[in-house]
Image: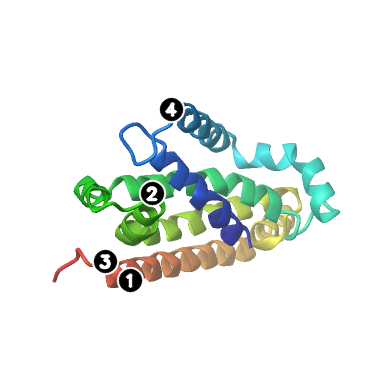
Amino acid sequence: MSFFMAYLLGTPLGILVVITAPKSIAPHKGVNEVLSWIINIGRSIPFIILMVALMPLTRWIVGTTIGPVATIVPLTIAATPFVARMIEQSLVEVDSGLIEMAQAMGATSSQIIFKVLLPEGLPSVVRGIPITIINLIGSYAMAGAIGGGGLGDLAIRYGYHRRQSDIMIVTIVLLIIIVEIIQLLGNFVANRIDKRDVR
C-alpha cells in the first residue's frame, strides 16, 4: 500500500519538477524551486524520526500508531519524495532531441509528457521501482523497533530481546532473499521493455 501510494503521489510531483525546470516544456522557476525544496526536505528526515513525528497524524488517519496499518502513513510520506526524485532522474535522461522534435510538430505539453517523456523514460522508471521497494523494506524493518510489525518487529522481539539468534538469522536471510528477488525481477522487466537495449 505504501509503495502504490508513494508512486501515486510521487510520480506527478516528479513530472512537475521536470517540466517546470529551466529550458523545459513549461518552465516556472518559482514552482520548480518550491517543489525541489519540498522533495529535499522530505528526503532529509531520517525515517525513524519522521515516524515518531507523524504519530499524531497517523493516529488521526488510521486511529492507531502501532501495527502494520499505522506504518502506511509514515512510509508513504517518507517514500513520496524519494519516488519523485527517482521519476525526475528517469525523465531528465530522455533525449532532448525527441522533445524538441515533438515541439516542432506542434505537440502540446500533455502530449509530450504522455507520448514522449513517460514512454522513453519508462525503462529507467522501472529500474527505480526495485530501489524504492527495497528502501521501503528497510524502513519497514526499522518501524518494527517502535511497534510497526513485520520482520523488523520479529527480529527485535524474538531475536534481540529473547536472545533467539536463530530467529535473527532467519530474518536476515529472508530479507536478503526478498531483496534479491525484487532486484532480479525489476532488472528483468526493465530489460524487456528497454527498446534501446539491442542484443
Q: In the image, which is nearer the foreground, mark 3 or mark 2?
A: 2
As shown in the figure, which amino acid type bears the numbered disc 2?
Answer: Ser
Disc 3 target residue: 194
Percent position (x, y) of residue 40? 51, 33
Q: In the image, which is nearer the foreground, mark 2 or mark 4?
A: 2
As shown in the figure, which amino acid type bears the numbered disc 4?
Answer: Lys
Q: Which mark is residue 109?
A: 2
* Mark 1, other Cα within 10 Å: few <14 / some 14–19 / many ≥20: few
The C terminus, quarter of image: bottom left
Percent position (x, y) of residue 162? 74, 57
Q: In the image, which is nearer the foreground, mark 3 or mark 4?
A: 4
Q: Is residue 142 visible?
A: no
Q: Earlier in the sequence, mark 3 or mark 4?
A: 4
- For the residues marked 3 and 1, what is the alpha-carbon distance in whole angstroms? 10 Å
Q: Nearer the viewer, residue 42 or 71?
A: 42
Label 1 element class: helix
Q: Give the residue drawn at x 61%, y 57%.
A: 5
Q: Earlier in the sequence, mark 2 or mark 4?
A: 4
Count of picture labels: 4
Q: In the image, which is nearer the foreground, mark 1 or mark 2?
A: 2
The N terminus, quarter of image: bottom right
Q: Nearer the viewer, residue 166 or 13?
A: 13
Label 4 element class: helix
- For the residues marked 1 and 2, what is the alpha-carbon distance in whole angstroms? 31 Å
The vertical placement of 23 against 1, above or below, is: above
Disc 1 target residue: 188
- For the residues marked 4 and 1, what is the alpha-carbon distance in whole angstroms? 38 Å
Disc 4 target residue: 29
The answer to whether residue 65 is left or right of residue 4 is right
